[in-house]
Amino acid sequence: MTTEDDVRRMCLALPGVTERLSWAQPAWFARTLMARMWEDGVLTVKSDERDVLAGSDPETYFWTPHHDRSPRLVLVRLKRVADDELDELLRESYRLAGGK
């Protein structure tokens, strides 16, 4: 099962990524926010495929009304995502957040 520590390790392995708190939760930044813990076991990332992800696997990918105004933000249930898939999501989010 993927944990917050796994997320931290994957994020901080990307060039220039820093970690700090955002809304009292661990968050990782490239130029802008790339990932943040939403709640225990749930991660926020950026994706151009939010609708596709949530449409194909709504038990893993979803968003709340809070995220409606940000069409790239998607929530990911960590217990339902494989490490390689999470790595791919984080790399896309890194790119969208201005990482090089």
Image: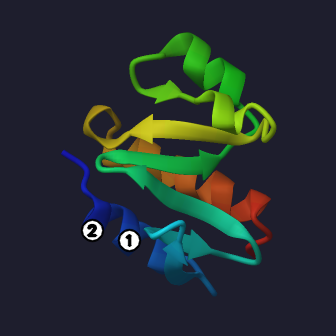
Do the residues bearing badges 1 and 2 touch, measured as CB atoms within 8 Å? yes
For marks 1 and 2, give the CA distance. Answer: 5 Å
Q: Classify mark 2: helix, strand or loop.
A: helix
Q: Quadrant of the C terminus?
A: bottom right
Q: Position of residue 14 (x, y in %)?
A: 55, 77
How is the structure coloured here?
Answer: rainbow
Residue extending farthest to the left is 1
Q: Quadrant of residue 93?
A: bottom right
Residue under pointer 2: 5
Q: Quadrant of residue 48?
A: top right
Name the residue located 50 percent from the left edge and 77 percent from the top edge. Answer: 21
Q: Residues within 10 Å of mark 2 (few under 14, many from 20)?
A: few
Q: Position of residue 34 (x, y in %)?
A: 64, 63
Residue extending farthest to the top is 55
Residue under pointer 1: 8
In the image, 15 versus 75, the foreground residue is: 75
